[in-house]
Amino acid sequence: MVELLVAMLIGLIGMIIIFQVFEVSEGIKRTTTSGGDAQQNGVIALYTMERDFKNAGMGFNDTGFVGCNIIGYDNKRATPNFPPAGVTMKLAPVFITSGAATTAPDQIAVLYGSQPQAAGSVPLGADYLNSADPLNVTNPFGYKPGDLLLLTEPNSGKNCSIMEYTGLAPLSTNQLRHDNTSYLSAGFTRTPRFNPPGGLGVFYDGVGTANVTRVFNLGNLYTTPPGGTAPVNFPVYNFYALANGSLTVASQFQIDNGQPAVTTIADNIVHMRALYGLDDGINDGVTVTYNVGPAVKGDGIVDRYVDAATFNALAPVPWANLIAVRIAVVSRSALPEKPSTGKLSDPCDATTAEPPWTGTPWAATLNYKTRLDVSASVAAPDDWKCYRYRVFETTIPLRNWIWKSS
């Protein structure tokens, strides 16, 4: 009996040692796996956004005629008139909406067209005073039925409008129709999506007035590759936001069941911030430190980074000086980790400080809207410390906006 009890004791001691080793090994595995997941999700999120934002501004990069709010009609939506109340769509390459608090992530929209023949605007040749009248343009080059057109009257305070070009008016070479009835495009009969019954309902000034309206061609809605059925290079207005711990993108021109199609890009993305990069000749000495000489407006070098609230408060809003956007996304490990003490009753300490922007100590103190406060991503106040985080940051040059139209 004594020998049996001694053997059981030795066996129990061995099992305790084995389980302790297993616990440590499992903790290391969990940390490594969670860190790898966070790395992968962050890379996917940032890569997807960067690839999209490099196209920003294509098709409307006459930088002096932008900044208006876009309104439209789309019969594929459950509510045809868009955008809905509380949502802003801007004629701008990138539009950032600041989060309302340190814990609220920013939202970012990107707009670009697909017109391969022209990127500049065309003046409106005559006043557009009747919603049912065709659109008179000074240069009809590059238009074909099915193109999505956008009208903006600079310095007037009017909204921008979009319309679907359905063909030339009879006996005309420069009057673009936007009928609400079927028409031919790319060899097929099309039903206009973006032309409301009765016309736009907004009037625009033409040549000879103080604010000549400009017409942009964002590209064709129905062009397909040889042998293909789906349109390629469809005009894009993508809206990036965080929802339920994931980075999502809503495509405003791609409709699914009456609503903009929403796609989840990466899971466990818990915060996002974005800043405008301005080449306006003002170096604040804080957000940009590599430009040691005097800041020069228009030299192609970012002079400072500003958040959306600061940018929108500038008068006039300097869309022409925008040359880059700086983005940071925060990914989180999928599983929480135990306290380092091993006691579940102790506070978590996997992360003890708010994630910072990489290499930018100014971000934590310059403005609350640049902070990466992840404390609201969990239910309990301090549970965010149970996870590990990775910050992925990049600066994306807006190539089309820098080149401008020629």
Image (tube, helix red, strand yellow):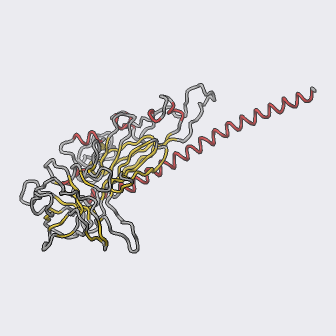
Report the number of numbered marks.
Answer: 0
Q: What x and y, as percent, mark residue 163?
A: 23, 59
**Could you say which is closer to the camera, residue 356 or residue 201?**
201
**Image quarter hosting the N terminus:** top right
Q: Nearer the viewer, residue 404 or 82?
A: 82
Give the quarter of the image for residue 152.
bottom left
Q: For the point 46% across and 45% down, which residue is it?
A: 246
Q: Is residue 133 placed above or below 356 in the rendered structure?
A: below
Residue 399 x/y as whole percent: 31, 58
Above-or-below relation of 8 to 321: above
Q: Nearer the viewer, residue 148 or 10?
A: 148
On the rendered image, what quadrant is the C terminus found in? Answer: bottom left
Is residue 386 left or right of 224 when viewed as pictured? right
Identify which residue is drawn at 92% across, 26% down: 2
Residue at position x 38%, y 74% in the image:
226
Residue 119 location (% of width, % of height): 24, 63
In the picture as drawn, the residue positioned furthest to the left comes out as 208
User: In the image, residue 369 lies at what x, y percent?
Assistant: 34, 36
Q: Residue at x 36, y 66 (%)?
A: 231
> Considering depth in this image, is 277 or 39 the residue closer to the camera?
39
Residue 389 located left or right of residue 60: right
